[in-house]
Image: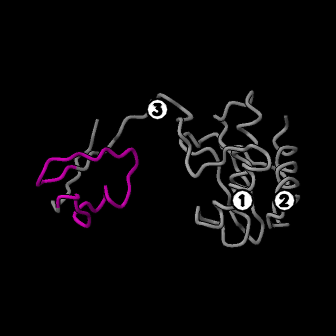
């Protein structure tokens, strides 16, 4: 089933049961080919919500596609850009009426084997705990600003 049709269907379903989804949702679902860990995302730009889903969600499972899109559509409701009490109550309404299993986080990974190894390694100087990092982040550039849970100072070691 085409994703834009699913989006329109989910919006209609939510409105039918009184969930106040925004009227300013872009009609086209954006496919993200880089998202390997998150199923979807709802973005507000210039007053318009855009729904984005990962290219790695199996397209042969239309129920799962509906659930992911419904999850993101609920974020367009007033006060629901988080997974707070109001968002959870709307997710429960969708479950009760349509049988959707809308969850805050996904239980199964989208891509089981991520081929990109960590390029950096943050190491606690006190307990030796290691924190691998793939990207050059603020913690990698300035590890002295961060602490391990034991209270130790971190140092960065470049991985090869």
Of labels 1 and 2, earlier in sequence is: 2
Q: In the rendered image of this protein, does residue 54 appear above or below residue 80?
A: above
Q: Which percent across, then down, holds residue 25? A: 81, 61
Distance, label 3 to label 1, CA atoms, is: 30 Å
The answer to whether residue 46 is above or below residue 14 is below
Assess whether residue 22 is covered by the magenta stretch: no
Give the residues drawn in magenta, as a range.
123-150
Question: Which numbered tag is attached to residue 17?
Answer: 2
The local secondary structure at tag 3 comes to loop
Queried whether the magenta region covers residue 140, the answer comes back as yes
Answer left or right for 37 relative to 143: right
Looking at the rendering, in which quadrant would you find the N terminus? top right
Q: Which mark is residue 114?
A: 3
Q: Residues within 10 Å of mark 2 (few under 14, many from 20)?
A: few
- Name which residue lies at 45% across and 30% down: 115
Estimate the spatial distance between the alpha carbons at disc 2 and disc 3, rounded to whole Å.
40 Å
Q: In the image, residue 31 lies at what x, y percent?
A: 71, 43
Q: Secondary structure at mark 1?
A: helix
Residue 74, label in figure: 1
Task: Establish if 83 lies above or below 5.
Answer: below
Mark before the other along the chain sequence, 2 or 3: 2
130 versus 43 height, above or below:
above
- Residue nearest the observer in this picture, 147 or 103: 103
Observer-nearest of 1 and 104: 104
């Amino acid at each position: 089933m085409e994703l834009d049709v699913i989006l329109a269907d989910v919006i209609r379903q939510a409105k039918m049961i009184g969930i106040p989804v925004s009227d300013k949702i872009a009609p086209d679902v954006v496919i993200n080919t880089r998202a390997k860990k998150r199923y979807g995302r709802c973005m507000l730009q210039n007053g318009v919500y855009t729904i984005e889903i990962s290219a790695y969600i199996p397209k042969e499972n239309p129920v799962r596609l509906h659930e992911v899109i419904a999850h993101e559509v609920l974020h367009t409701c007033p006060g629901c850009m988080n997974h707070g009490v109001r968002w959870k109550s709307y997710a429960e309404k969708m479950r009760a009426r349509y049988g959707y299993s809308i969850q805050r986080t996904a239980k199964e990974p989208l891509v089981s084997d991520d081929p990109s190894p960590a390029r950096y390694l943050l190491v606690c100087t006190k307990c030796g705990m290691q924190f691998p990092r793939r990207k050059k982040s603020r913690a990698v550039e300035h590890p002295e600003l961060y602490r391990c849970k034991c209270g130790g100072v971190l140092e960065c070691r470049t991985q090869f």
